[in-house]
Image (cartoon, helix red, strand yellow):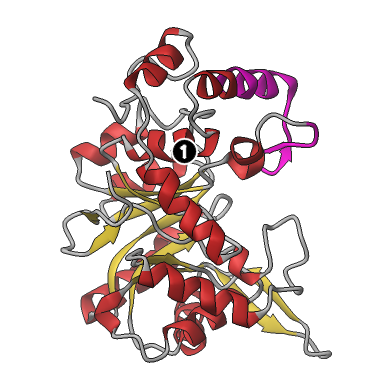
Amino acid sequence: MRATDTVEIGRTGLHVTRLGLGGVALSGAPPSTDPHNPSPESEAVALIRRSLALGLSYLDTAPMYGVGHSERRYGQALRGIPRDRYVLSTKVGRVLRSDADGKVTWAFDFSREGARASFESSMERLGIERVDIVFIHDPDDHYQAALSGAFPVLQELRAMGRIRAIGAGMNQWQMELAFAREGYCDCFLLAGRYTLLDQTALPEFLPYCVEHQISVVAGGPYNSGILAVGPRPGATFNYRPAAPEIMDKAARIAAVCERHQVPLRAAALQFILAHPAIASVIPGARSVAEVEENVRLVELPIPGELWAELRKAGLIAADAPTPDE
């Protein structure tokens, strides 16, 4: 597999690279840190342009990431880049507002008006007139509002040609499956629920997506940290300190990887991409060096014996596809 190989999103004719660039870190870093303290713009712009130079043409962002900083950095980096050189996704459902002191905050708003306002303000920050993919962002407690408000707006924008594909981006698969059954969605962004440590999306959600030609973009491939740094003290799993049973499982997986001289992160990325529902994986990156390393990890040869050992030990699901199959 090459990081620059492409896969179609649903039946849209839109193709994304197997490795993309997540936009959270471009704003300052993960949700647990201060979103008002972004990384320098020059570094973010250089990182985005290096990604494109490497052939990684799929880029993801959202208004929430750094309360607008991520989108602005993409806008700066993409200025002057031919529009057909990249595929860009952003999100609606969180509207940015300025208080009396000029501090920017966000609030959930899945209404028609909120979704349209979110979309137009994103286009302004990005400096473009159309975007390729729009996800409804974390509507966990707002299912009906998303169905009656945000989704119809995205359908209208898709019909107008201002969006190519629509879906939802969440940290759970159950509601994404419910949205899929409504028949609106071309794709989903699913964070942290199909990884080396968490395959809860495997039995029901991913097969449904394959059957109905709905693509899945995998976010959070390292479960917020533990699969990137290994099972060391302080490691996090889904944005919380990893529980003892998770630490134990991660340690066992890491030991298998070490025996086969394979970086844990390489196994984490390639495992996800082996499933036919997964179109792209979008790890965040904070530097040009990390982007280059992600390419190497996706393309690194991994012996089939590693996957066989993980399966035999019950460390991955028996029916999980692996890259050697």
Q: Position of residue 83 (x, y in %)?
A: 29, 83
Q: Quadrant of residue 231?
A: top right
Element class at badge 1 = helix
Q: Which residue is mark 1?
A: 266
Q: Residue furthest top?
A: 312
Badge count: 1
The quadrant in which the C terminus is found is: top left
Of residues 168 and 132, the one drawn nearer to the viewer in this rendering: 132
The range drawn in magenta is 233-253
Is 235 covered by the magenta stretch? yes
Of residues 115 and 171, the one drawn nearer to the viewer in this rendering: 171
Is 156 covered by the magenta stretch? no
Q: Residue at x 54, y 28 (%)?
A: 197
Q: Position of residue 127 (x, y in %)?
A: 44, 90
Q: Residue at x 44, y 85 (%)?
A: 123
Q: Residue at x 31, y 26 (%)?
A: 321
